[in-house]
Amino acid sequence: MSELPGEREDLTTAVRELADADVVAFGGVGLAGQVLVPTEAYRTVEAALPDRGEEIRPRLTWLLANGSAAGKAYAATLLDRLDPAAARDAWRGLLDDRAELTTFSGCLMDQTTLGEYAAARLGQD
């Protein structure tokens, strides 16, 4: 499949944005349903997964090792779409991480640690 001009650069920009993310939100937040920049970046990477998953996988591995707490959460979530077993391993590897992150679910904002977030994703909460 040929790529559109700027497509690869958009993916690189999105991964960089996720690496620096300070919030995890998968949809619009607040009463206005504002879509945050990290959410847009997540969606860009997510949309590319079906056709370019194996190309993206090393970027997710890099993000798990080098990203912010929120970036690591996004990476493990995206990895789940490619390889659920690898994603479970990634979440398990994050269980002891005390780095804090902010999460949004609609209008609700919460503060948690990456380890607590990982435990919830593994059903251990």
Image (tube, rainbow, N blue to C red):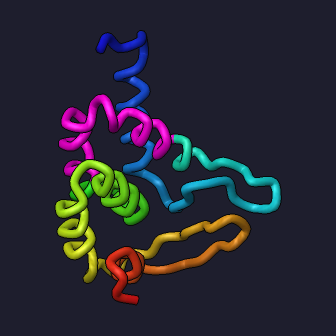
Residue 59 falls inside the magenta stretch: yes
Residue 91 falls inside the magenta stretch: no
**Going by the picture, which residue comes out furthest to the right?**
31
Q: Position of residue 19 (x, y in %)?
A: 37, 50
User: Which quarter of the rendering shows the N terminus?
Assistant: top left
- Which of the 4 image quarters holds residue 119? bottom left
Check the image and report above or below for 61 versus 89. above
Residue at 30% of width from left, 57% of height from top? 80
> Which one is in front, 98 or 119?
119
Q: Position of residue 94 (x, y in %)?
A: 26, 73
> Which one is in front, 56 or 49?
49
Q: Position of residue 79 (x, y in %)?
A: 28, 53
Residue 35 horizontal side relative to residue 58, left or right:
right
Residue at 48% of width from left, 71% of height from top? 101
Point out the stretch of residues depicted in magenta: 41-63
> Which one is in front, 50 or 23?
50
User: Which quarter of the rendering shows the C terminus?
Assistant: bottom left
Residue 82 horizontal side relative to residue 41, left or right:
left
Number of marks: 0
Q: Position of residue 71 (x, y in %)?
A: 38, 56
Residue 21 horizontal side relative to residue 94, left or right:
right
Residue at 35% of width from left, 52% of height from top? 78
Residue at 41% of width from left, 42% of height from top? 46
State whether the magenta stretch is mostly helix, strand or loop. helix
